[in-house]
Amino acid sequence: MSTKPSLTLRHERIAGVISVDDFLLFCNRTLDGYERVLGRLDDASVNAVPSTGGSTPFQLVTHAIAATHWWTSHHVCGRAVERNRDAEFEAAGPLADAAATVAEFRTTLAELAPEIAAATEVHGAPSTQTPLGQDWTVGACLIHAYEELAQHLGHLELTTDLVT
């Protein structure tokens, strides 16, 4: 006989451990990282393509914030969110616009906190892989939203090293 807890028990235990405040804390710390990296750039370098190819820092910021916003606002909170993923990788603009995108999303996250706390089910079926072979849950969507934000901060840091 297996001693593993059921998926239901495991989810209940996790839900009691990870709070909205925890989620916001880690998102805000990661957004601090975006601001630190953007502080190393200027209008030219924020739009520079690394010699190795790939996305510009501006495109990475645009994509990471759009993806995180989409997961939290749309799938967790049920808000209508317009998103053009392909356009995220064509985005360009002044450094001030990239910094404003980060600052505005920080405010959006704070405004979403009550809706995130009240969320009990996922809105719409995410058009991506199913995590761990199970259905998407609010918790899984929040972890994936943070995953997007964190992984692209690392990508932004490396890209910035290449263009400065």
Image: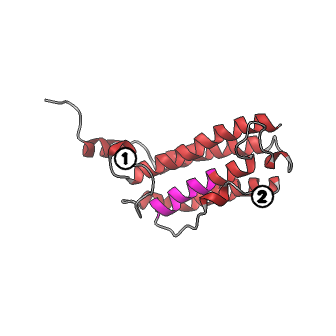
Q: Position of residue 106 (x, y in %)?
A: 64, 55
Instruction: Tell me which segment is drawn in magenta.
Output: 64-77
Based on the picture, tell me whether residue 66 belongs to the magenta stretch: yes
Based on the picture, tell me whether residue 104 belongs to the magenta stretch: no
Q: Report the side of 130 relative to 1 (left or right).
A: right
Dot label at residue 15: 1
Q: Residues within 10 Å of mark 2 (few under 14, many from 20)?
A: some
Looking at the image, which is closer to me, 25 or 140? Answer: 140
Q: Position of residue 100 (x, y in %)?
A: 74, 57
Q: Quadrant of the C terminus?
A: top right
Question: Which kind of residue does numbered mark 2 sit on?
Answer: Asp
Looking at the image, which is closer to me, 89 or 98? Answer: 89
At x 57%, y 62%, the residue is 111
Seen as rendered, the residue at the extreme bottom is 80
- The residue indicated by pointer 2 is 97
Main SS of residues in magenta: helix
Residue 65 falls in which quadrant of the image? bottom right
Dot label at residue 131: none
